[in-house]
């Protein structure tokens, strides 16, 4: 795995400076949908220009380069501590190069040592599988959109949301209403129905590994995903909350079993600056294929 | 399109209306969470940070040193402003701000301070770090870097043609309030 350091640095760089094709297509579509001459259209034009500039200059799409979250699929017996150390060095190096902002703060002292390394940063999630393949996915998720995430416990009397899919729909749409303007829309929702509080948020974030144009294997959830996007886009919240036709670019829903006493709906919001990439690695740690 | 040049006069600020697109030329200082809390707790700005008639930018940029040892801003979009709502009205009053740039809008207390003291909230496009960094022509100074770290420090930016949209004006109007009320009413039809 002698090429792993270079591969991980390139993964971090590309994730920070380029938006994946599926997201870019959705942004271009929404620019075309906005009414000409509105401030919503102006905002979408600036967003589109920004995507091109970031790629051409190899500089971060957004200055908030976010939480650094790695998802690693690896064979049984894979050297996890070795990978983690290499990933930490790649993050530190990428920060020195300006691909990542000095973004990790000691919660008690307020100190920022400028390395992006510390408890919880970067976050690594390993998943073993019975195949020799090593696949590394990376999500960079900014703080503005993280702050508008929400977790609802059903039933919710105020929103008249019961413990069923209609209740889930009501709280999800409430989250869209509350997030307006603050999460850098048009955004994408990652949602988990069920689980405990930690697992729910965790699976809601994993939804961001899905491509925007994929389909949910569960037809009921596929229908709900489409309904959430269509209904949100009728609300007139629009890009940046300026008013307009595109409030959401997508919604993805996962499910976990729950305890009889609990019914959580966990919602993570991803801004339009949706930074997600992935690589399949060869035996020396070289990049064999980009996954998005 | 209106051009604002710093320092901004009260008359120029009061002439702005919600929905106006503006471009800003002159000096911006960044200030976000740590700076607002510091000022609220009685902290004094260092000499050199003059915001009388000025514009404060809610921003934590990515800034690196170039080959000659000069600061170079490589990414500089706005951060979410609502976190400064507990402090912003006081900061507008004490510093004599004519403009606050951020994203996501602010609340009633800031709106009231904008009206009383003659300040406008200027919404930059969130996430547009490259388009906005292109408008930063130089970075002459940084203040309080040691205390607050790079994203939270007070950066001085000389800008030209920096684009923003007026979403809270000095006449008591807020686009954020209007859109929230309208979207809430619309949502009621679909649930």
Image (spheres, coloured by chain):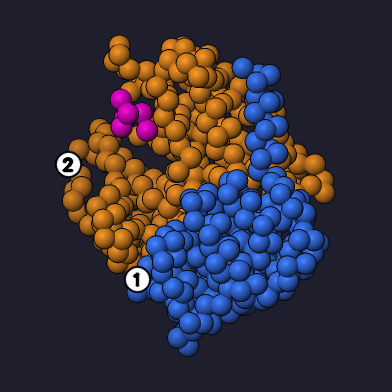
Chain colours: A orange, B blue
Q: Residue at x 39, y 22 (%)?
A: A153
Specify few, some or many for label 2: CA neighbours under 10 Å numbering under 14, 14-19, or 20 or more. few
Residue at the spot of label 2:
A77
Q: Position of residue B66 (x, y in %)?
A: 48, 81
Q: Position of residue A276 (x, y in %)?
A: 46, 46
Taking the magenta stretch, the answer to whether it contains residue B116 is: no
Q: CA distance from mark 1 to mark 2?
A: 45 Å
Position of residue B111 in the picture relative to residue A277 (left or right): right
Position of residue B68 in the picture relative to residue B159 (left or right): left
Vertical side of B144 occupied by A54: above or below? above
Specify few, some or many for label 1: CA neighbours under 10 Å numbering under 14, 14-19, or 20 or more. few
Taking the magenta stretch, the answer to whether it contains residue A198 is: yes
Q: Residue at x 58, y 49 (%)?
A: B109
Q: Nearer the viewer, mark 1 or mark 2?
A: 1
Residue span colored magenta = A196-201
Q: Residue at x 46, y 74 (%)?
A: B45
Vertical side of A189 occupied by B155: above or below? below
Q: Which mark is residue B147?
A: 1
Q: Quick one: A182 or B33, which is closer to the camera?
A: B33
The subunit letter for the residue under badge 1 reads: B
The subunit letter for the residue under badge 2 reads: A
Q: Which mark is residue A151?
A: none
Q: Quick one: B61 or B123, which is closer to the camera?
A: B123
Q: Position of residue B100 (x, y in %)?
A: 61, 61
Q: Is residue A49 visible?
A: no
Location of the N terminus of chain A by quadrant is bottom left
Q: Quick one: A254 or A143, which is closer to the camera?
A: A143
* Discs 1 and 2 share one subunit: no
Q: Is residue B175 visible?
A: yes
- Indicate the secondary structure of the residue bearing disc 1: helix
């Amino acid at each position: 795995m002698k090429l792993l350091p270079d591969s991980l640095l390139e993964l971090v760089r590309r994730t920070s400076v380029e938006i994946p094709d599926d997201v870019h297509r959705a942004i271009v579509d929404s620019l075309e949908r906005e009414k000409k001459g509105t401030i919503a259209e102006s905002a979408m034009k600036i967003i589109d220009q920004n995507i091109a500039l970031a790629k051409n200059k190899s500089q971060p799409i957004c200055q908030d380069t976010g939480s650094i979250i790695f998802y690693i699929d690896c064979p049984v017996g894979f050297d996890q501590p070795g990978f983690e150390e290499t990933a930490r060095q790649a993050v530190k190096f990428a920060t020195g190069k300006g691909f990542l902002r000095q973004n990790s703060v000691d919660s008690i002292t307020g100190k920022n040592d400028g390395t992006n390394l510390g408890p919880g940063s970067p976050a690594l999630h390993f998943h073993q599988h019975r195949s020799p393949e090593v696949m590394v996915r990376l999500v960079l998720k900014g703080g503005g959109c993280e702050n508008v995430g929400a977790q609802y416990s059903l039933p919710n009397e105020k929103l008249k949301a019961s413990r069923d899919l209609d209740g889930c729909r009501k709280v999800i749409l409430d989250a869209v209403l509350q997030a307006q303007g603050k999460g850098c829309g048009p955004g994408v929702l990652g949602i988990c129905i069920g689980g405990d509080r930690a697992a729910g948020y965790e699976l809601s974030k994993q939804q961001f590994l899905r491509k925007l144009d994929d389909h949910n294997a569960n037809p009921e959830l596929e229908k709900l995903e489409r309904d959430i996007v269509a209904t949100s886009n009728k609300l007139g919240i629009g890009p940046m909350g300026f008013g307009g036709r595109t409030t959401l670019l997508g919604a993805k829903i996962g499910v976990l079993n729950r305890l009889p006493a609990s019914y959580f709906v966990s919602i993570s919001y991803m801004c339009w600056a949706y930074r997600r990439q992935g690589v399949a690695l060869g035996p020396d740690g070289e990049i064999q294929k980009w996954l998005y | 399109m209106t051009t604002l040049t710093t320092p901004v006069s009260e008359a120029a600020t009061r002439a702005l209306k919600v929905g106006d697109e503006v471009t800003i030329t002159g000096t911006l200082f960044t200030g976000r969470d740590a700076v607002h809390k510091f000022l609220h707790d009685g902290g004094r700005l260092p000499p050199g940070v003059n915001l009388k008639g000025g514009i404060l930018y809610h921003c934590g940029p990515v800034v690196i040193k170039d080959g000659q040892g000069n600061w170079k801003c490589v990414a500089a979009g706005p951060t979410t402003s609502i976190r400064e709502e507990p402090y912003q009205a006081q900061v507008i009053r004490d510093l004599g701000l004519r403009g606050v740039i951020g994203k996501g809008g602010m609340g009633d207390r800031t709106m009231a301070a904008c009206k009383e003291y003659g300040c406008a909230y200027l919404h930059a496009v969130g996430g547009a770090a490259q388009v906005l960094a292109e408008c930063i022509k130089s970075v002459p100074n940084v203040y309080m870097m040691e205390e607050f770290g790079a994203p939270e420090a007070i950066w001085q930016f000389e800008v030209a043609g920096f684009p923003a949209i007026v979403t809270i004006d000095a006449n008591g109007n807020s686009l954020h309030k209007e859109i929230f009320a309208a979207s809430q009413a619309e949502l009621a039809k679909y649930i």
